[in-house]
Amino acid sequence: MKLILKNHTEWQTKDLRKLIIANLKESGLINQFKSRTVILSNQTKRRFNFQGSNAMLGMGWIQMCIPKQFFVKAVGIDGTLQSREVEFDSVGFSKVFQHELQHNQGLRHKDMLDWQKFDCSWANQFQVRKYQSQSFDKPIVSLKQKRLLAAESKVAKLEKLINAKQILLKKWQKKLTYYNRG
Ligand SMILES: [Zn+2]
């Protein structure tokens, strides 16, 4: 079986491929089709589950919608309900993937078990990591550039100060002229 995997997420393709292959083996359907296409896309809305995933009926095509982050709700020390970021939900992914595999077999919802009831605890051992995010928001600045920027900022500050003092000087000069007349 040839797996055509198109990954449009920030999660590592290598890890996702392992998890998908494990799912295909677990289902016993790995050789059902000569090739399978799995599209992995980002959740478009801020969701923390795999909602929006779908599959083609009777064909080897699955799309999985993957959240950018995973959270669990937990009660904090102060007693309030808080969200805590957790690792990729490999078990949740597998439950949905197994459901989609059933669609590929030609099954419709009325003929299927509730996907939440699938036992995919075996998937716990599969870790899916994110690509190291590269930070482009901080451009590399040379020492010379840094000093130039600092000098420009200093000049701007001093000019502003001189301007303010000049306004103040004019005000007092006016007062002086007034008192001199008197
Ligand atoms: Zn379905």
Image (cartoon, rainbow, N blue to C red):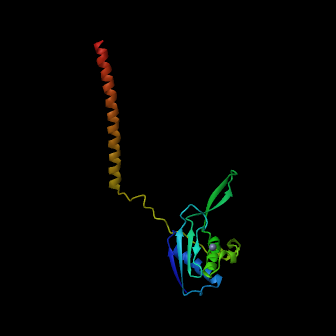
The quarter of the rendering in which ligand 1 is drawn is: bottom right
Residue at 34% x, 33% y is 164
Q: Which of these two is toward me, 151 or 60?
A: 60
Q: Is residue 11 visible?
A: no
Q: Residue at x 56, y 69 (%)?
A: 65
In terms of image quadrants, where is residue 29? bottom right
Picture quadrant of residue 75: bottom right
Q: Is residue 79 above or below residue 3?
A: above
- Which residue is more in the foreground, 52 or 47? 52
Quarter of the image with the N terminus is bottom right
The residue located at (57%, 66%) in the rendering is: 67
Compared to residue 179, the image places residue 68 above or below, namely below
Name the spot of residue 81 as percent of width and height, x first: 67, 54
Residue 108: x %, y % from top left: 65, 77
Q: Residue furthest top?
A: 182
- Residue 175, image x and y in percent? 32, 20
Quarter occupied by residue 72: bottom right
Numbered disc total: 0
Does 147 sit above or below residue 167?
below
Q: Nearer the viewer, residue 141 or 18?
A: 18
Rendered-image quadrant of the C terminus: top left
Query: What x and y, as percent, mark residue 100?
Result: 61, 76
Q: Is residue 100 visible?
A: yes
Q: Is residue 78 left or right of residue 10?
A: right
Which of 114 and 132 lies nearest the eye of the viewer? 114
Residue at the image position 34 percent from the left and 43 percent from the top: 154
Please state if 8 lies on the left or on the right of 23 as rendered: left
